[in-house]
Image: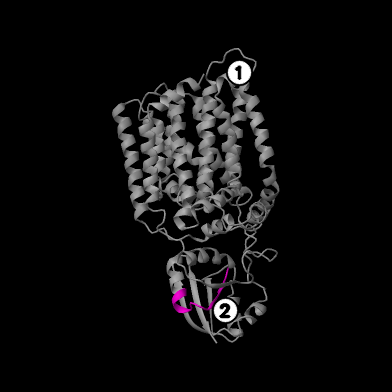
Amino acid sequence: MSTSTAAPAERRFPGLLLALAGVALIVRWSVIGRDALWLDEGYSWWDARQTWAALWTLVPTCDPHPPLYFALLHPWLLLVGDGTVAMRSLSTIFGIATVVVVYLAGRVLDRARGRGDRRFGIGALAALLFAVTPFQVYFSIEARPYALLCLGASLLTLACLSIVRAIETPARRLAFAWLDRAPPSAWAMLLAGALIVVWSNNTAVLLLGAVSTAFIVAWIVDRDSRSLWVPIVAIGVVVAVLWAPDWPLLLEQAKEVTGDFWIQKPSFEGITFELHNLIGLDLLRLTWWMAALIAGGLVLIGRRIGWRWASMVAALAILPIIYNVVISYTINPILISRALIGAAPALALALASAAMLLRTRSLRVAVAVALIAVHGYALSRFLGADHVKEPWTPVVARLAAIAPAAPILVVPNELVLPLAHEAKMQQVPFRVLGLPADYPATGVAARYPSGKCAPSVVDQDLAPLLARLANEPTVVLLTRRNNTYDPREASVAAMRAAGFRLQSDDTFQPGDLRILRFTH
């Protein structure tokens, strides 16, 4: 049985596993609180503070993600508070857990090769590279669902490799051979991983499609795999039933995204750019070199371990990307690097295999050292770079300086989310009014269908709101330059029509945030 060899092998390497987790923690903790929450994290802050009923009704309407992450963040904030580091630390926990699971998945490959006693093998190298990859570090310090999605994908990867191991394990003559060939943990991880990914991100359906494709092809061409179809089909049915409550919203959002979305149809350069985040270590020129190494790793897995293993890793690593590109060209663009994060665990295993499956020890060491060095260089660039997306800390300081008691009009109204969080962190009380209505504004024409709580100012009557401000000596407008929610600056025109005069106009980069101070 496969369970008899796994546990003792892992008990021999607790120090290495703890060291890998420690590296992941140190890297992430060094930058976790450097910047204020940005707009998307502001959504998470608002989402997680809603009632349990709203988490499953209103929140999915306002935020284009299934509600699992926000449902987990809700009690987390009650436990540790809603400070910047506290909010992001949940993603950090998910990120470190993913490093551990990637290590375990790599150990399955090591044992399949007969090198389970090797202290530093595919699992250790894959986990180390994963721990310091800038793309993974970033989403492990962002209060968004992507680190949770990646954790679910790593569980899926480990489960699928355990099932491949079960296929290659001679079964005793039992009525249900799968009970003897695969450990219960493999089926539990397959179920848990599938549920986590589909309830974390809508594009994760592509990862589930990749897993399904791998199993269907195996059933067609691999006779030995057919004895395992009872639990695979059963788990598929359970996943479908437990995922069914999200189907209506998923279908509605998919329909709306095809009508209007901000992602453009990808060119070859666009595909390269998105992949450079996922596999190129944020180094554009390295993207296709890394892709070549990953392809080489898949070939080595096939030749040194077996083509069942290579086919499964390839399906998990490559098929979600292919499906995403095909949909982006034929239906509607959805290609964006963070939507591909579910392929990252399998990609890390393939990359580590490109080094650790080489026959010559000196070459194996050289390639592994080169990969670690390149990842270290990319990490140093990442840690030294400015990752501010919106400079809310100086924005709040400026607002407090120029008009501490004045009402602040916000266009689009969603900007109030990161503004309010940073104002709370700086303990600065503001009076904030959203235009054309306070967030969340449901039932008003939205600029983007995927975010129905942030309406456009176009063709809206702002007079009633401005009438409430007639006796205010100073009013501040917080907006953006080139604002797609207010492209003709109707809010500025309405202020002037109401008798307000522009006194100052400050712009903050990045994000094109703009503070306009008006007086009567």
Q: Position of residue 426 (x, y in %)?
A: 45, 67
Which type of secondary structure does the marked residue at label 1 adopt?
Answer: loop
Question: The C terminus is located in which quarter?
Answer: bottom right
Q: Amino acid at mark 1?
A: Ala
Q: Nearer the viewer, residue 368 or 503?
A: 503
Along the viewing direction, whichever of 283 and 430 lies nearer the viewer: 430
Vertical placement of residue 219 versus 417, above or below: above
Q: Is residue 245 visible?
A: yes
Q: How is the image coloured?
A: one colour
Mark positioned earlier in the residue sequence (1 or 2): 1
As drawn, the residue found furthest toward the top would be 173
Residue 62 is covered by the magenta coloring: no
Q: Residue at label 2?
A: 492
The location of residue 412, given as percent across then percent down, is 58, 68
Q: CA distance from mark 1 to mark 2?
A: 71 Å
Seen from the viewer's position, the closer of residues 90 and 228 is 90
Callout 1 environment at 10 Å: few (<14), some (14 to 19), or many (20+)? some
Q: Which residues are magenta?
A: 399-412
Residue at image location 50% in from the left, 63% down from the top: 421
**Disc number lying in front (1 or 2):** 1
Q: Residue at x 44, y 44 (%)?
A: 279
Residue 47, picture quadrant: bottom right
Mark 2 element type: helix
Q: Position of residue 45 (x, y in %)?
A: 54, 58
Q: Residues within 10 Å of mark 2 (few under 14, many from 20)?
A: some
Q: Could you tell me the amino acid type at mark 2?
A: Val
Q: Which residue is mark 1?
A: 177
Q: Is residue 304 visible?
A: no
